[in-house]
Image (cartoon, rainbow, N blue to C red):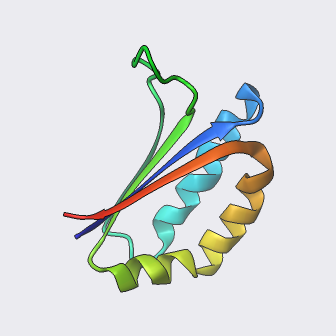
Amino acid sequence: MIKHIVLFSAKHSKDAGTIKAALEKMSQIPQVLSFSVSYNSKRDKYSKEMDVVLYSEFASWSDLDAYQSHPIYEETTEFVRPLRDKRIVVDYEA
């Protein structure tokens, strides 16, 4: 199983909700086994800069590749990119 975690910081805090709503559309991509988008609780005293967390699971690396080349993914990326400041990705096999 492949776990794909993406953290986003909004350029302007008012855009965090817009980013979250846009990312939720990617749950419709067929290769997704598990998917959630949430606000970062910002409880960690050393790191509070990330606003939105996307968590997803895939059966294989090729399914993750297919997800990232899907039109919904591409459309969402184009929409979110100007609203975000930072984007951090963690992909690993579990």
In the foreground, 61 or 21: 61
Q: Is residue 81 left or right of residue 63?
A: right
Residue 32 place in picture, x, y as percent: 38, 70
Q: Residue furthest left?
A: 94
Tell me which residue sits at (74%, 55%) in the image: 81
Q: Is residue 46 above or below residue 74?
A: above
Q: Residue at x 58, y 81 (%)?
A: 69
Please state, as top left, top right, bottom left or bottom right, where the C terminus lies in the image: bottom left
Place of residue 54 in the rendered image (x, y in percent of width and height, measured from the top left): 46, 50
Who is closer to the viewer here, 1 or 72? 1
User: Along the line of sight, which residue is nearer the eye, 68 or 20?
Assistant: 68
List the single residue furthest toward the right. Answer: 82
Tell me if residue 50 comes above or below residue 22 in the rendering: above
Residue 83 lies left or right of residue 57; in this view the side is: right
Q: In which image quadrant can residue 50 be found?
A: top right
Measured as percent of width and height from the top left, residue 13 is found at 71, 27
